[in-house]
Amino acid sequence: MSDTNDTSIVLDHVSKSFGERQVLQDITFSVARREAVCILGRSGTGKSVTLKLMIALIKPEAGHIWIEGDDITQLNEQGLSRVRRKMGFLFQNAALFDFLTLYDNLAVPLRRLTQKSKQEIEETIDRALHRVGLSGDREKMPNELSGGMKKRAGLARALVLEPEILLVDEPNSGLDCITASEIDDLLLEQKRHTTMIIVSHDVHGARRICDRFAVLDRGRLAAIGTPEELEHHENVTVRRLVTET
Amino acid sequence: MTSPLETIGSVALFALRVIRDAFHAPFELFYLWQEIADQGWRSLPLIVSSGLAMGMVMTLHTRNELIKFGASASIPQVQALSFFVEIGPLVAALLLAGRVGAAMGASLAEMRATEQIDAIEALSIDSFKLLVVPRVAACFLALPLLTTFMDFCGVLSGFLSEHFLSHISLQLYVSRAFRGVEWSNFIPPTLKTAVFGFIIGTVSCFFGYTTDEGAEGVRKAATSSVVVSSLLIILADVILVKIIFVMFPQSAL
């Protein structure tokens, strides 16, 4: 399967298992450029695995994954590196490098993957931290940050290379409703520039940001569509996941 | 469940990858320097205090026997040779395996469990080159230096205890200590610790970097790093001593 000019991500009959446990089975869907899709599902249905497959942190047993026209299941390390540069990933627990300051967390990709001067790197990081409201915390270590600050710092790091695709794993987990709403605001602002895949249990927040929902049920894609379409879906799990707030 | 043979094969491949990647750009000099500071500089108090204590104990154990055989003049030489040839290199390596090996294994395992290694890969950065190669290289470079400190501290504390017991002067102690000591008694045994450092770094990084068992993996990585690297150091010592004797026959005591 190849992509059209408007398609950013294509999953084509993707299956993944860990040992005996089949996590994903025959998943097929595509995401258009600048579209935001939320992956919903009960715990353990393979939502985070889907994100990790999209950035090739794990490989599928079957199927193909196309990112901006490249089949990442067929690429070597160099090719994967090229594709990953188009992508940003906000991990569930932010996954900040605990041996580096907040500033250095953002500086690592800029120093390694761009030709920017020291001055330009400094300006880029200052802009990124200002955007997420962490300007005054640049010299702090990750263990000095609260959960919400870590999430915002993780988002700043994911966006520092201005990716075309942003993958977000549980942006609101463990956060109070005000901080969660602030993270959603940042994602909403980013939506204008980026294709987004968000894994979330927060349907209320997801409805604000996402154009479509993809619902996974027991490793299979149970439904994909707009929230309004899925509210009346025949599958009761889909209906409950989409309507419960 | 991985068999011991599979683990040995995996460690060997891991070691080969370390060697290959160490000679390919980009060279992580900033992180290498950070690791040398962490592993070398911060291990120094442990090495110095252990060297001083062991030097004193060594003198207390040997001097009575040597005096009994009328060889009291050989006390400084026995002290120096024991430390240069075996005690300094082996004890410094085992101490580093305990302090740094456990920390490296645990910290990499924790980075794996908290998705930090995935985050590095997601940023299209080679996590192996960034995290593993500088750690192993730092162990390789730092251990010979730490061994030299341990040797010096062992001889120094030998002098202090002998001076306290027999009032020997520093000049006389030093001249007796280095009488009959060849460069081959000092240089090859000190350089062999670079191999010990490589073993500590590689084994510890292997158990930390390749774990996928979450918090339990952190505990296992810390334990396995110390146990396996200590065992391999002792086994490697047997082989390296034999090689040194073949290459430098004059170093055989």
Image (cartoon, coloured by chain):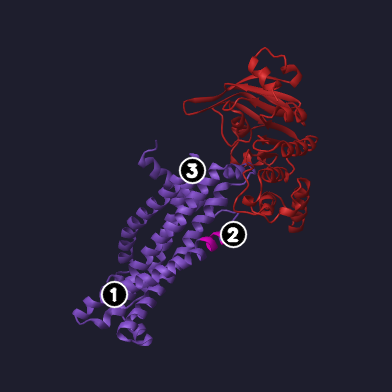
Chain colours: A red, B purple
Residue to which mark 3 is pinned = B210
The Cα–Cα distance between marks 1 and 3, rounded to whole angstroms, is: 45 Å
Tell me the quadrant of the picture where the C terminus of chain A can be found.
top right
Chain letter, disc 1 residue = B
**Number of numbered discs:** 3
- Depth check, mark 1 against mark 3: the one in front is 1
Dominant secondary structure (helix, strand or loop) of the stretch shown in magenta: helix
The x, y position of residue A117, in whole percent, is 74, 57
* Residue span colored magenta: B33-38
Instruction: Give the number of the disc on residue B60.
Output: 1
Q: Amino acid at mark 3?
A: Thr
Q: Secondary structure at mark 1?
A: helix
- Position of B8 relative to B92 (above/below): above
Quadrant hosting residue B89: bottom left
Query: From the viewer's perspective, is the residue at label 3 or at label 2 nearer?
Result: 3
Q: How far apart, in angstroms, are the residues tagged by discs 3 and 2?
A: 24 Å
> Camera-side residue: B49 or A48?
B49
Taking the image as drawn, is residue B181 in sight? Answer: yes
Which residue is painted at 29% across and 69% down in the image?
B249
Residue linked to disc 2 = B29
